Image (spheres, rainbow, N blue to C red):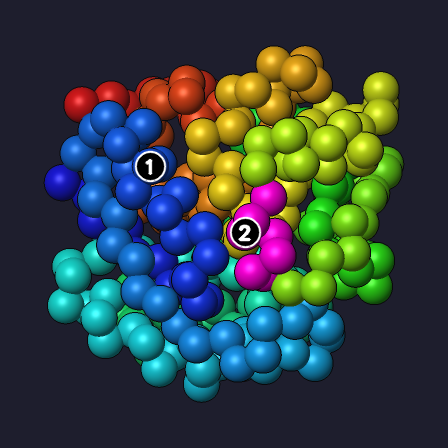
């Protein structure tokens, strides 16, 4: 049994995680601990507050008790708004606080793009443009080429969590371009676990979504590879370990 720990801000699309655990169909356990978010707003000041180290680390005790082997801060915007160096400091502080390997969804996107062998990507973000621009900057700092981006400009996570498959598909289509080899949806408040196969079929290319990438990043930290085609191209890479 491999136990994975996640610190998830608020209560928005957290039901993606038991769905992903089910789709993994393996000896993987997903443990979720909720952190506070303060103001639910996609504004830079509010997002930096959500990702403050003391705010995140305050919730780690529950993960220690769960037996988790690695922890991921499951907030893309609560990481990349601190910049490449600031996000590294955040993750280091989290690893010290929890006493196990740690990462964040933002870094998961960088590693996941490399995993699928993509060189050029499009970003389909729910955020306002100034927030999306920081994610694009973060990806470029990780040597990921962003060829297109689209910002839906929603006000906060609760609004994003209410989106259905049609709205998510429209967002991905709006960002996609012929030269993009993958499309990235960075918001962990979006319910995407049940829609990845539909997104990839429609776009004809890999789609990386925040909660999918978050779980994959935790598996990477524990050196596990799981074949789960229902979770998209990211989960069909070799070498595969399947129980």
Quarter the N terminus occupies: top left
Q: Quadrant of residue 184?
A: top right
Q: Position of residue 5 (x, y in %)?
A: 29, 57
Q: For the residue carrying disc 2, how many other residues have a C-alpha within 10 Å: few (<14), some (14-19), or many (20+)?
A: some
Q: Position of residue 68 (x, y in %)?
A: 22, 57
Helix or strand or loop: what does disc 1 sit on? helix
Q: Check the image and report above or below for 94 versus 29.
A: below
Question: On the image, numbered disc 2 is attached to which residue?
Answer: 161
Quarter the C terminus occupies: top left
Horizontal side of residue 157 vs 60, given as left or right? right
**Foreground of the two, 221 or 189:** 189
Q: Residue at x 61, y 14 (%)?
A: 201
Q: Would residue 8 be seen by someone viewing this image from the given angle?
A: yes
Question: On the image, numbered disc 1 is attached to which residue?
Answer: 19
For marks 1 and 2, give the CA distance. Answer: 15 Å
Q: Would residue 139 be seen by someone viewing this image from the given angle?
A: no
| Residue farthest toward the bottom in the current orientation of the protein | 54
Q: Which residues are magenta?
A: 157-163
Badge nearest the viewer, 1 or 2 = 2
Q: Residue at x 36, y 22 (%)?
A: 228
């Amino acid at each position: 049994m491999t136990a994975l720990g996640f610190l998830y801000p608020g209560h928005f699309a957290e039901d993606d995680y038991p769905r992903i655990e089910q789709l993994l169909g393996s000896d993987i356990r997903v443990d979720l601990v909720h952190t506070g978010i303060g103001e639910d707003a996609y504004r830079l000041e509010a997002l930096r507050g959500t990702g403050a180290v003391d705010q995140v680390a305050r919730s780690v005790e529950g993960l220690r008790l769960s037996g988790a082997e690695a922890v991921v801060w499951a907030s893309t915007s609560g990481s990349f708004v601190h910049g490449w160096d600031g996000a590294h400091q955040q993750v280091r502080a989290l690893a010290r606080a929890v006493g196990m390997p740690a990462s964040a969804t933002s870094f998961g996107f960088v590693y996941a793009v490399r995993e699928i062998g993509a060189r050029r990507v499009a970003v389909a973000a729910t955020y306002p443009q100034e927030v999306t621009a920081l994610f694009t900057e973060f990806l470029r700092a990780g040597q990921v080429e962003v060829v297109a981006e689209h910002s839906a400009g929603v006000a906060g996570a609760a609004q994003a969590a209410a989106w259905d498959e049609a709205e998510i598909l429209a967002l991905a289509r709006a960002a996609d371009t012929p030269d993009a080899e993958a499309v990235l949806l960075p918001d962990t408040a979006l319910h995407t676990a049940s829609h990845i196969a539909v997104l990839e079929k429609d776009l004809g290319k890999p789609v990386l979504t925040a909660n999918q990438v978050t779980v994959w990043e935790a598996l990477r930290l524990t050196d596990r590879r799981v074949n789960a085609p229902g979770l998209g191209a990211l989960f069909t890479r070799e070498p595969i370990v399947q129980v």
